[in-house]
Every structure is written in C-alpha cells, then in structure tokens.
Image (tube, rainbow, N blue to C red):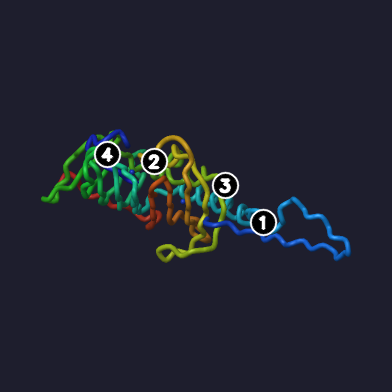
C-alpha cells in the first residue's frame, strides 16, 4: 500500500457482529404467599455473550490468512482514505516484494506533496529503491530514495506487512459470510495496535488500539480480500485482488 511523496514527509502507503446467546426467562411456582421481589437483574437482561464457535472460527481464519499473506509475493492493492488527513488519499497499484529485498510497485495514487497541501493525482513506479513519477510526456522522473517516501515491499513483509496485521488482531469474532468483489468471504472483527497498522498505512499513529474488520476468503487459500481500519472520525479501506499474479514494472529509463 504504496505511498509516494517528494520528501513529502517522513511517512514512509483484514467478522462482524458475533452471534449472541439468548437467555431464557425463569418462572417460579405458584403460591398463595406472594414471593418477595428479587433485587437481581432478570436473566433476560444480561448482555449477549460471544459464541465460542464464532471465536474459534475467527482464530482459525486469522491463523490461516496470516500464513497465506506472509508467504504472498504479489498482490493488487486498492486503498481509500475516508475523512482522515493522511499523506495519501488513494492508492491503486500492483505490488511485489520480488526480487527478494526489493519491493516494487506500479500504479496511481492521490498524494499530498506537503502536510498542508491539497492532494494531487499521479502515476508512479517504485523500483531499485527509488520512486519515479510519470510526467505528461510519458517519461518517468526519479523523485526520491524509496526509504524517504515509502517501501512497497513492507505491504507483503512477513514481519511488518498485511500478514502481520492479521496475526496481531485481538478479540476476534467471525460473522456471517459475505461476497466481496465476487469472492465469498467471512468477516472477522476485532482490534489491533495502531503501531502495527501504521507500518502499512503511515499516519494512523503509533499508540492505542483501532477497530478493524477483515474479510477473509472462505476456503483455500485464505486470502485477505478486504480490510477496514477505523480511526475517528474516519477509516481506511484496503481491497486486495490478483493474489500472486506477476507484476510488470515499466521501464523508467525510456
């Protein structure tokens, strides 16, 4: 999830409601003598509990998906920021961490070139640890070292990327299956440390916990299909596709 900037800043660019258990009302035996009223709350007023099945399913889905995403070498990323002022507003790109140790990406993004600037659209390529932007003439211009803007390889990094985010979700609960972009998924809701997400989506902060929903493909492989991270007053939605498909990087020297 791939971000650009021109020394723009230091920022270098995954269920639902759990099933509830119904409590049954208790009934007393009839009597001529009126029983004293209980001061305890009725069982029917108790808060709904999380289904053990929902939790177990969520744990298994997260474990399977984390393993899949940590071994993934290429994916298409569509990122949209809503009601938050981050460096990037949108990213739509193919990302790969091949060759090993060299994250590469090609796509388009809407980026703020400075913290107080309006976002501007651009086409970009990241390779050879350098960020290039495409000009009106179709030529690419080197803008900055990759580590000064964003490292696309972090998206698929086993230690810091999407797989790590999935593995770090707390208090997960599985919801009813949903179809996302033609893929049947199971949503999993929970929370995650902001610092864990910040590695992939810079600007979300490095402290506190954030609500997160992950839509994980039903069956095998357990690809992450969609991720929604909430930070008041907005959210960031990441939708993935083209898992494992080869990425073609344009020639930036032409």
* Residue drawn at point x = 57 percent, y = 53 percent: 173
Task: Name which of mark 4 and mark 3 comes first in the sequence.
Answer: 4
Report the disc number at residue 128: 4
**Image spot of residue 85 (x, y percent):** 31, 43
Between the C-alphas of marks 4 and 3, the distance is 40 Å
Task: Name which of mark 2 and mark 4 comes first in the sequence.
Answer: 4
* Residue drawn at point x = 49 percent, y = 61 percent: 185
**Image spot of residue 49 (x, y percent):** 64, 54
Task: Name which of mark 3 and mark 1 comes first in the sequence.
Answer: 1
In depth, the one of 17 and 98 nearer the eye is 17
Between the C-alphas of marks 3 and 2, the distance is 20 Å
Task: Name which of mark 1 and mark 2 comes first in the sequence.
Answer: 1
Q: Horizontally, is 49 left or right of 122 in the view?
A: right
Q: Secondary structure at mark 2?
A: loop
Q: Secondary structure at mark 1?
A: helix
Residue identifier under label 1: 45
Between the C-alphas of marks 3 and 1, the distance is 23 Å
In depth, the one of 78 and 37 nearer the eye is 37
Between the C-alphas of marks 2 and 4, the distance is 27 Å
Q: Relative to 54, is 140 above or below?
A: above
Counting labels gives 4
Cβ atoms under marks 3 and 1 closer than 8 Å? no
Q: Relative to 79, is 23 above or below?
A: below
* Residue drawn at point x = 21 percent, y = 47 percent: 120
Q: Horizontally, is 64 left or right of 96 in the view?
A: right
Closer to us: mark 2 or mark 4? 2
Report the disc number at residue 204: 2
Mark 4 nearby-residue class (10 Å; few <14, some 14–19, many ≥20): few
Mark 1 nearby-residue class (10 Å; few <14, some 14–19, many ≥20): few
Q: In the orientation shown, which residue stands out farthest toward the left? A: 137
Between the C-alphas of marks 1 and 2, the distance is 38 Å
Report the disc number at residue 171: 3
């Amino acid at each position: 999830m791939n971000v650009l900037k021109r020394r723009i800043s230091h920022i270098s660019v995954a269920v639902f409601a759990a099933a509830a258990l119904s409590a049954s009302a208790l009934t007393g035996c009839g009597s001529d003598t009126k029983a004293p009223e209980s001061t305890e709350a009725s069982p029917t007023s108790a808060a709904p509990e999380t289904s053990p099945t929902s939790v177990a399913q969520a744990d298994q889905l997260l474990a399977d998906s984390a393993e899949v995403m940590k071994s993934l070498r290429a994916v298409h990323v569509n990122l949209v920021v809503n009601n938050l002022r981050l460096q990037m507003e949108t990213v739509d790109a193919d990302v790969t961490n091949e060759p090993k140790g060299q994250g590469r990406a090609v796509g388009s993004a809407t980026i703020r070139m400075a913290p107080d600037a309006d976002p501007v659209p651009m086409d970009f390529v990241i390779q050879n640890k350098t960020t290039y932007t495409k000009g009106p003439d179709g030529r690419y211009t080197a803008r900055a070292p990759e580590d000064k803007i964003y490292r696309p390889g972090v998206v698929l990094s086993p230690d810091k990327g999407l797989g790590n985010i999935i593995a770090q979700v707390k208090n997960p609960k599985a919801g009813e299956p949903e179809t996302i972009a033609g893929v049947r998924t199971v949503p999993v809701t929970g929370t995650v440390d902001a610092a864990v997400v910040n590695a992939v989506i810079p600007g979300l902060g490095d402290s506190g916990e954030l609500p997160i929903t992950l839509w994980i493909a039903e069956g095998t492989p357990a690809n992450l299909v969609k991720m929604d991270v909430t930070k008041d007053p907005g959210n960031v939605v990441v939708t993935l596709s083209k898992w494992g498909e080869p990425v073609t990087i344009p020639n930036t020297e032409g």
